[in-house]
Amino acid sequence: MIDREKLFSEERSRRILETAIELAEKGGFSAVRLRDVAEQAGVALGTVYKRFQSKEDMLVAALEMQMEDLESHVITEHISGDNPVERAVSLLTLFTAWFCSRPKLARAVLRAMAAGEPALSDKIVSFQKRVDAFIVGALRNEDPTPWLSVEEELPLKDEEIQLAHMIQSLWFATMVGWSARLYTEKEVVRQVEEATWMLVLGQEAHLKRKEEANS
């Protein structure tokens, strides 16, 4: 598996990904052709294939690279909210706004992630892990940055990760609906807010029931 940090720091790889992003922003998924990426990035086509197995692989890697900028923005930006749900919704509102501000690129990477290619599983799991960490950070009102350097499982409680992952899955599914033009950006945020309340309150009730059953 290609080392993520090494990939992004290596000049040719970064140029390839930046070119893929530029093409996707202009023309969407269909505009990202490996031959065109190689030509505009000024590298041999073989160099592109050496680093990426497909354009789906390239787009998911591009999303990972873009996430670094988004995470920096989220960390420096104040996540508002007086309770865990409000903070989680505030976080996902920022994520949603970032995606929706670049609709062609967003639809391209969402399509790539939903392609179901086994070769992409490691990259997608890495993306999900980072988003889970940010959601838990918002729920706790803590900076999740220290958790992101952990190579294996996130050093968090199982119920926290489970809740964050359910919230993220709901958000991702709703973003896929946005990609298909079923929802507007405001509708995505509204659905995420309502579902997050239900998930948080439902987990609280579930944990209370388990405590009572064990007492």
Image: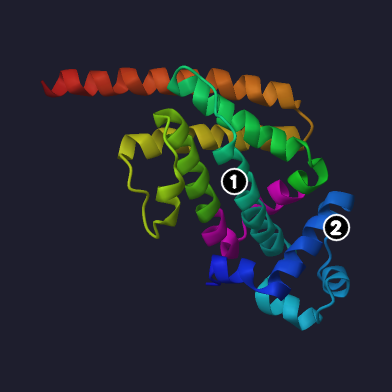
Q: Which mark is residue 21?
A: none
Is 1 or 140 nearer to us in this picture? Answer: 140
Tell me which amino acid carries mark 2. Answer: Leu
Image vertical order of residue 158 relative to residue 197, above or below: below
Q: Quadrant of the C terminus?
A: top left
| Residue identifier under label 2 | 23
Point out the frontmost of discs 1 and 2.
Answer: 1
Q: How is the image coloured?
A: rainbow
Q: Which residue is mark 1?
A: 72
Q: Residue 129, how many percent across, how many down?
A: 47, 49
Q: Is residue 129 above or below residue 39?
A: above
**Along the line of sight, which residue is nearer the eye, 76 or 148?**
76
Q: Earlier in the sequence, mark 1 or mark 2?
A: 2
State the image coordinates of residue 209 (x, y, percent, origin top left).
24, 18
Q: What is the number of callouts on the image?
A: 2
Q: Is residue 41 left or right of residue 192?
A: right
User: Does the stretch in magenta take in 119?
Assistant: yes
Instruction: Find the magenta span and give its range.
Output: 108-124
Main SS category, magenta section: helix
The residue shown at (22%, 23%) is: 210
Amino acid at pointer 1: Ser
Residue at horizontal 72 percent and vertical 75 percent from the top: 12
Residue at the location (64% across, 36% down)? 95
Helix, strand, or loop for circle 2?
helix
Residue 200 placement: quadrant: top left
User: Is residue 160 shown in magenta?
Assistant: no
Q: Is residue 201 above or below residue 95?
A: above
How far is mark 1 from mark 2, CA to CA? 24 Å
The residue sitting at 88% across, 74% down in the picture is: 39
In the image: residue 29, left or right of residue 77: right
